[in-house]
Each structure stands twice: as structure tokens, then as C-alpha cells.
Amino acid sequence: MTRLKTLLTSAALFAALGVTGAMAEVTVLGWPGGPEEAGLRKAADAYNTTASDADKVKLIFFNRDGFFDKLAADLAAGSTDFDVNLLATYALGRYAPFMDPITLPEASKSTFPEKVLATMQYDGKQYGIPTDLSLHFMYYRTDLIEKLLSDADWKAKYGEISEKYLGKKLEPKDPDAWAWEDWMATALFFTKSINSDSPTRYGTVLQMKNLLFNMMVWQSTARAQGGDWLNDKGEVIVDSPAYRAALDIYKKLYDEGTSPKDSTTYEFAEANAAFGAGQAATMLQWNAAFGDLDNKEKTPAVAGKIGTVAPPAGPEGRFTHIHGLGLGINKASQHKEGAVKFLNWLGTPDAMEIYSKAGGSPALSDAVVAKVSAERPDLVKLGQYAGSYGFVMHGGTAAKALQVYELQAKEFTAYWSGGKSLDDALAATKTGMAELLKP
Amino acid sequence: MPRTSRFEGHLLIAPLTAFLIALLGFPLVLDVVYSVSRVGFENIRAPELIGFSNYAKAVADPEFWAAAWFSLRFGLIVAVIQMVAGLGLAVFLAPLFAKRPWLIALLMLPMMVAPALVGLMYRLILHEFVGAVPYYLLEWYGDFPAFLGRDWAFTTLVTIETLQWTPFALLILHSSYAAISPDIREAASLDGARGRRLFLNIDLPLMMPALGITFFIRFIDSFRVFDNLYTLVGPGAGGSTTSMSIYIYQAFFKVGDIGLAVAASMLLLVASFVVLWAINRFTARKAPL
């Protein structure tokens, strides 16, 4: 009897699994474990309520660690386990050979600004619908900056410190008017080992781990100095004075102790922990960090006291690295028709409204963002900054762009940590990039 | 051997042989092909044969040798420390283990934690703003080292590896120590051997094969270190903590140079074979003891 029950239960379980599998014909591989996943889940639920059984979507997620490496291996192996998969601007060239270009639905052209749609383009073709945009904010503590701008003693001390460490006497400024040297002076001022009156242990927290994403955070500094990967002739120009100046900004701040000692092992989470603990006055960080940092339950020390502006200005202007996450079609997919239907729907204003209200961070056109601005005021700033300050380095979507970031991460962290001279690090970067980016 | 028995023997061993060929033989052949090919993710199904240039590239790459030196240094230092610490604990705790053998199970617990989780755990423990170690050092001494920084990362990694895997050495060496016949020790005592002399002249020589095996197992395990190292510091600032395993992983997944990665792994395979052969010879010679 027991055996019979077990058999019946197993049969019922298999039947149930079979039904679920039959219902979900289009499998979507999304970006796991964050607001993007929450947004995609809500959007998929909404889509499935109206889609036919054959077109319903099922979501799957890898772990974030090594996500793009695993995706590359799966795509290259011709996996049919997913029909729609995540794309990122900096990996477009890597994945394009294994994906189908798409034809943008008319609706998407009014949903997203042209510059945002371009984050999913490679070699003149559109490979995905942009779902999220990432850029950088300069985070700062509003309570500390307000006091700095109003307290005469602090102002005088600020002037002394900037003169001693930067060679020129500076006045405190509103963060939205910062040049890079103003940020440096502020970081020095709020460092306890330099200014014993500082309420924070560090003036900033730098992400200097040998990790490609950290190069994206840093390179707004280089672009503001006039740096680029390639010139108009396609020659690598990273050994420029602009790159030297930008690398030295981080080096100076790290060597003077304005950032934690272990900063050479810091990435997104570690930097947030430092800033969230209330022990760093400023931080150049991804826009995605804002939600958690401003959450009173998660980071009570700083929530409600955080200001965000675009990164500081340099001689060439004010810039922020941008890249998009999006969804495109696996070339090996066996459900391409259903996949196209889902992406066409995802590019509509209604779908993006659901997606953004559930946590996603799309950069939307003014008309669409107006519908969600009450619940997601950060998306308004996201669109503005992307339009005004966004940049992609020349060569930044090349097939080996990720490898370029990896190379830079290795060489530049060697310089910052004292393992290599600036000349050696830049020479090695230039040689390696020339090899990686050769036509 | 009668022909029927030989046939039966072959028949019985055939499934295992087929299993090994499928599981080990096929990947090995594929690795050999990839190692002499220009192959990336773009042409992973159609590699282009180019001879031995991947091997030449690996051997000419200073980072390959830096990674090999890192792994060798790490493996040797960690294996020696674990062997000595394991021996010390096995000898000094032997009376305690004799009375309370369950303590051994308690000491084995660190081995039960996945190395990748150990890396993540220490990433938290050593973090300045959430970790206990920097917090208390700052409270008590007003300062703390950058545990994961370029200057300290190697020492930190050695310490973590030692804390997790010394129990393994202890387990083997405790078994070996406990297996020494009390009669031998009693006879030595009658001849006047005591304390250190008894240990150096009786216990230690009898434990040499176990010490050798412990050293080699720990060396191999530490030489191929990857998971805890990767989750804790990754390749390190400027590649300063790049082990052989990380070098191969980086070349394969990050750079996409699969030919180079596989050629480097084949070189590692040859080196490992030499080490295993040495172990085999050593243990075979010492076995009669």
C-alpha cells in the first residue's frame, strides 16, 4: 500500500512538472538577485496573464558570480536551455556571434531615448531591449557637507588641508559644482588621520579591487581629464597625460589614507558597507546602491542623509560611464517567435512601468518616466545624467572590451598598490589593448 | 590463469574501464586538441590547429611563472606548517583523545565547510566595518593591518588555509601515532629512552611514512588552491595572488584564450604527474616500516 501511494504521489508530481513545463514555452535568463530580478518577475507575471499558453515565459537565474562567463560558455555551446538572455553593453561584442539581432518595435522608440537604445547596439544592429541603465553617482553625506559649507572653523581647516596636500588653497563648494580636486580636498578633510576633528574615519571609499567593474567606476575620472581608449585612427591612447592624471587622483587619495587600507580588495558591497557604516563622507558608486543606502532598516547610520550628484568635472567636462543591461534572443533558441513577442511587449511603456515600479532601473523617455516619477524619483535623475553626462569609451563595445577592462584592472591596481610604476603599468596596458582591439 | 577466468576478469573490469575512458579519456583527448589549437568561445566547436604555440606562449609568459611560483610557495609553506602543527597536536593531545575520542570529531569541523564559503566568511570577518578582527584590533591597539592588502594577503591566505586544513593532518597523524605499539615504547623506555629522545628516535621514524603522505596530500591540495582564494581576494592587486588555478581560470573565462588556458593546464598535469610519481615511489619504499 505504501509503495502504491509512493508511486501515485510520484506520478502526480511528474504530471504537475510536465504541466508547468508545457505552459512555459519561452525561457528567459535574467540578471539574478537584485532589483532587476524583482522587476523582471513582476513584468513576466503581468505578461503571462494575457499571453497564450504557448507564449508564456518562464524565468531562470544563475548566480551573479561569474554570470557572464557561464553565459558565454552556454551560448558558445549552443545551449537551448533559454530563449531570451541577459545582455550588457560591455559584453555585446562577445555575445553578438551567438545572438539574433532584433527589429525594434515601434513602441520601444517612444519608450526609450535614442541614446539608451544605442546601449544595446553592436556593429549597427540592435541586439536587445534595454531594461536597466547603470551609471555612477557621487554619493555624499548631506549633514557633513552642509556643516562644511557653513562652519567657519571647518572652512579654514579645509583651506589649510587642501593647501598642504594639494598645493593650493581651496574653498568648500556644493558637491554639484565639484571639480575632481574639490572632491579630493573634501576626502582629505574628512579623513581622521589627517583631520582629527573629522566625524568620519575616511573621506571616501575607493573600489580598487582587481575587477573589471571597478575600472568602469574609475574611468569617469579619466574621461573628465580628456582620456579615451582609442583616437580617431583607432590607435590606443591610454598612455596620455589624462590617464596619468586620473590614475594619480586615486593613487594620491589611497596613499594619503583617505580610503580604507583594504580598498585594493573593495568592490560594490565592501564600499557600500563602509559608506553605510557612516565612516566615509563621500563615495563614487553605481546608481543601484542608492536604494539600500537610503533604507533606514538596512543602513540606519546614513539613510536620509545621502545626497547624489553626477561625478565631478574635469578639464574636459563632466562625465559618467553608462552601460545598459537588456534582454536579447539566443541564436540557438527553439522558441524564437514567442521570444520576439515577449521582447516586443517588454519594450512598451506599460511593461516598463510595471518593471520600474517593481525595482528595475530603466532609463525612460520623459513621457514614460513621468508616470513612475512619484514612486521612483531616482529614475528621473538617471535619465537626465545619462543624457547629459553619459559616455562609452571608443572601443567600449568591441568584442574584447571585457578583456580590456580585465587588463586595465590588473595593471592599474598594480600601480595603485605599489606593485608597478605608472610608466610600466601604462606601457603594459597599451601593448595589451593594441593586441585585444586590433581589427 | 585459465582462459575462462581471464575472460571473466576482462568482462568484469570492462564497465569500469569504459566509465574511465568516457570520463577521463575523452576530456583528456579534447584538452590535447584544444591545447594545440587557436580556440576561443567564438570557435569552440571548430578549433584551428596551430601546433605548440600555446605551450610556447604559456612558457614565455612571466605571469604563468609568477602563478606557478605563487602556487609552489603557497603549497610548500602551507603543507609544512600543517604537517608540523598536525604532528604537534597529535602528540600533545594524544592522552586527551584517548580519554575523549569525540573531541576529534569536534576538531574536524573546519574541514566540513566548503572552501568557497570559508573565503566569503573571512572576507566578512576581516572587513574593517563589519568584521570582528579589525574591530577589536582597533579597540585594543588603535590600528590593524590591511589583512587582504598586497603586503598581507599571502600571510592571511596561509593562515586561513592552515586553520581550515590542519585538522586533516591531525587526523592522519593521530591515527599513525595511535598505531605505534606500546610494546615498542615500553622496550625503549627499558633501555632508558625518555621524553624527547623517545619521540625523536622511536615515534618520529615510525611516523615518517604518514608524515610524508600528509605533506604530499596537503601540498597537492594547497598547490591547486582556487575557491577560497578566489572568493577572498581574487587574483589580487596587479595579479599578486594569482595561483595556477586562477591563471588558468582567467585565461579561459576572462581572456577567452582557451588554447592558452588548456595548454597551461596540460603543463600543470605533467607537473602533477611527476609529483604523484614521486609520492608513489616514496610511499612504496617506506611501506614495509
Image (cartoon, coloured by chain):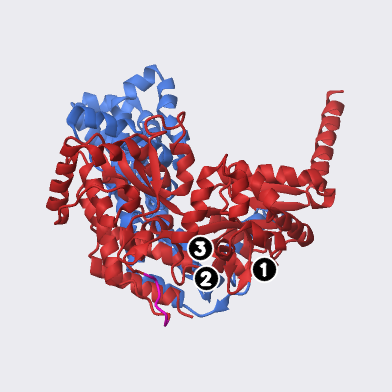
Chain colours: A red, B blue
Q: Which residue is mark 3?
A: A90
> Is B98 or B146 nearer to us in this picture?
B146
Q: Residue at x 16, y 36 (%)?
A: A196
Look at the numbered discs 1 and 3 and tell me whether their residues touch, using CB distance below 8 Å.
Answer: no
Q: Is residue A305 left or right of residue B195?
A: right
Furthest-top residue in this view: B99
The tag earlier along the polypeptide, 1 or 3, is 3
Q: Nearer the viewer, mark 3 or mark 2?
A: 3
Mark 3 and mark 2 lie on one chain; the one further toward the N terminus is 3
Q: Where is mark 1, residue-wise?
A: A101
Which amino acid type is marked by label 3?
Answer: Tyr
Q: Chain of mark 3?
A: A
Residue A135 in percent (x, y) is at 46, 54
Q: Which residue is mark 2?
A: A399
Q: Do the residues marked 1 and 3 share a common chain?
A: yes
Left or right of residue A424, residue B236 in this image? right
Please tell me which residue lies in front, A249 or A408. Answer: A249
Q: Judge the density around disc 3: few (<14), some (14-19), many (≥20) Cα neighbours within 10 Å.
A: many
Under mark 2, the amino acid is Ala
Highlighted range, magenta: A228-233
Closer to the eye: label 1 or 2: 1
Do marks 1 and 2 share a chain? yes
Dot 1 lies on which element?
A: loop
Instruction: Using the rendered view, name the quadrant where residue B98 is placed.
Output: top left
Q: Amino acid at mark 1?
A: Pro
Asked if one can make out residue A134 in the rendered structure from this viewpoint, the answer is: no
Cα separation between marks 3 and 2 = 9 Å
- Point out the tag, 1 or 2, that comes first from the N-terminus: 1
